[in-house]
Image (tube, grey):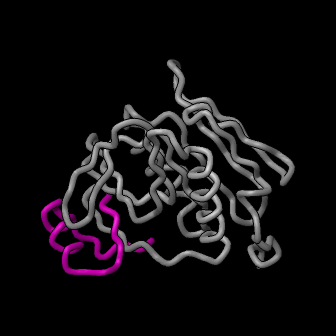
């Protein structure tokens, strides 16, 4: 992620920019960041996640969104593009040129060297303000490893799942993710140059 400039932007300037550009941008604390392209491994993992979740959620009132669905963080006035987001029940959408989701119950980020610190830090801080959010996953792309954060009354509970034989249970959705499916076709040697 690269900031466009050091100046503070207004939300209005942000929306004006995104309406005239094809690239994707996030708005964070008055700064605008251009979203860069992703690696092959990153894209394979996201595709595998969407396929696995959609197959298990078929017939239920759940929607799985890819990285083009922006999430609005009202508490901070920020706008993010998670790699995958899921809503069960009625999706709350702000309709504009780029629709924005307000109530995801699950958000997934696939970690990249350029975004890992941000995904763990400011982005997760922002996501935690969403009352609807029940689970947050951080997925490594260079090894079979998923960090899971689950909302509890006392805060967020952390667990980790590792190894291609492991299966992760998603309590917010009532489904599972087999790591062998999440990492299908991913070449870890290519992901570790």
Location of residue 125 in the rendering, given as x and y in whole percent from the top left corner: 44, 43
Q: Nearer the viewer, residue 86 or 158?
A: 86
Quadrant of the image occupied by residue 4: bottom left
The residue drawn where x is 56% and y is 44% is 57
The residue drawn where x is 30% and y is 81% is 22
182 shown above or below 113 = above
Location of residue 10 in the rendering, given as x and y in whole percent from the top left corner: 16, 61
Q: Is residue 138 left or right of residue 73?
A: right
In which quadrant will I find the C terminus?
A: bottom right
Q: Is residue 177 left or right of residue 180?
A: left
Magenta residues (range): 1-28
179 magenta-colored: no
20 shown above or below 159 = below
The residue drawn where x is 61% and y is 29% is 157
Q: Residue furthest top?
A: 153
Q: Residue furthest front?
A: 59
10 magenta-colored: yes
Q: Nearer the viewer, residue 150 or 154?
A: 150
25 shown above or below 53 = below
Location of residue 119 in the rendering, given as x and y in whole percent from the top left corner: 52, 55
């Amino acid at each position: 992620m690269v900031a466009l400039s050091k100046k503070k932007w207004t939300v209005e300037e942000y929306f004006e920019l995104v309406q005239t550009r094809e690239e994707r941008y996030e708005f964070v604390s008055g700064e605008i960041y251009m979203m860069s392209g992703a690696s092959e491994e990153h894209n394979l993992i996201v595709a595998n996640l969407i396929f696995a979740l959609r197959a298990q959620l078929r017939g239920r009132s759940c929607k799985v969104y890819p990285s083009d669905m922006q999430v609005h963080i009202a508490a901070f006035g920020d706008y993010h593009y998670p790699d995958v987001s899921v809503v069960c029940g009625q999706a709350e959408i702000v309709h504009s040129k780029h629709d924005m989701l307000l109530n995801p119950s699950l958000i997934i980020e696939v970690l990249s060297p350029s975004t890992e610190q941000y995904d763990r830090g400011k982005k997760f801080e922002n996501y935690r303000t969403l009352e609807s959010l029940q689970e947050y996953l951080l997925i490594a792309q260079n090894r079979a490893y998923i960090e899971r954060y689950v909302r509890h009354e006392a805060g967020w509970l952390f667990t980790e799942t590792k190894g291609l034989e492991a299966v992760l249970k998603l309590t917010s959705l009532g489904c599972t993710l087999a790591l062998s499916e999440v990492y299908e076709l991913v070449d870890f040697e290519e992901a570790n140059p």
